[in-house]
Image (cartoon, rainbow, N blue to C red):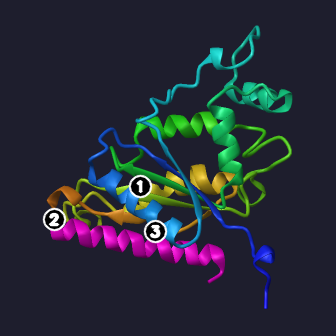
């Protein structure tokens, strides 16, 4: 019999959400997944980029004063080495490094993520901590050994994203490749299947509730995978 004090520590998740309307289905979906992950025994922190008014722009004045040509990644590397990264980047980076699972929650805008989410990645996936310096990229990235998952809503219905659909938008996976491969796998994450609700604005109340339950179930399956259950 295993003593409770010897039990493995709870897995940790960081859920980063980007939607300007707290009453949106996207926000409800983020809340549902957060609740499910906690019910599965994970410690979850929710970061709401719009609610916190996060600045998505990487500025020169976010780093220690310097002269000459401004190269953001070089400045990030120097700031990591000299421990001069400012807030909120330092706190967010600490949360990122401690999380076993990163969940990026957002509506699909122009077949990508909202600018505020991309800006958060620009500022927090810093060179010298998540890649580069002592780390490589992909299998050698600074976030290797961790998992990441996208939590999406779309404007179009599922049929519009079916591969080969006449007059369709195209395969959703092809639109997500630059995020899955170019952002998440690049820094070492194992990318889990995305949780997608297609066209929630087209659903009635019962349909939206069904979609939330599906999102919960898929999130629970992903957390079980992390826990080895």
- The disc, 2 or 1, on the residue closer to the chain's N-terminal end is 1
- Horizontal placement of 119 versus 124: left or right? left
Cβ atoms under marks 1 and 3 closer than 8 Å: no
Q: Percent position (x, y) of residue 6?
A: 81, 76
Residue span colored magenta:
205-229
Q: Quadrant of the N terminus?
A: bottom right
Asked whether residue 52 appears in the rendered view, the answer is yes
Q: Nearer the viewer, residue 144 or 40?
A: 40
To which residue does mark 1 refer? 175
To which residue does mark 2 refer? 205
Q: Tell me which residue sits at (79%, 50%) in the image.
A: 136
Q: Quadrant of the C terminus?
A: bottom right
- Horizontal placement of 103 versus 61: left or right? left
Q: Tell me which residue sits at (72%, 46%) in the image.
A: 130
Magenta stretch holds residue 227: yes
- The disc, 2 or 3, on the residue closer to the chain's N-terminal end is 3
């Amino acid at each position: 019999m295993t003593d409770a004090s010897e039990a493995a520590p709870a897995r940790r998740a960081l859920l980063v959400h980007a939607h300007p309307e707290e009453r949106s289905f996207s926000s409800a979906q983020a809340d549902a997944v957060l609740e499910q992950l906690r019910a599965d025994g994970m410690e979850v922190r929710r970061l709401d980029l719009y609610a916190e008014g996060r600045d998505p722009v990487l500025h020169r004045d976010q780093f220690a004063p310097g002269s000459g040509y401004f190269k953001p990644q070089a400045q990030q590397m120097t700031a990591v080495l000299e421990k001069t990264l400012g807030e909120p980047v330092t706190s967010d980076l600490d949360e990122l490094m401690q999380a076993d699972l990163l969940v990026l929650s957002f509506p699909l805008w122009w077949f990508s993520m909202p600018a505020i989410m991309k800006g958060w990645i620009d500022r927090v996936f810093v060179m010298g901590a998540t890649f580069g310096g002592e780390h490589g990229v992909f299998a050698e990235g600074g976030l290797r050994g961790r998992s990441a998952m996208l939590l999406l809503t779309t404007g179009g219905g599922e049929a519009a994203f079916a591969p080969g659909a006449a007059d369709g938008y195209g395969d959703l996976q092809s639109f997500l490749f630059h995020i899955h491969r170019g952002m998440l796998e690049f820094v070492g994450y194992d990318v889990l299947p995305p949780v997608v609700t297609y066209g929630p604005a087209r659903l009635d109340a019962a349909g939206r509730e069904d979609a939330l339950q599906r999102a919960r179930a898929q999130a629970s399956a992903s957390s079980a995978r992390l826990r080895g259950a």
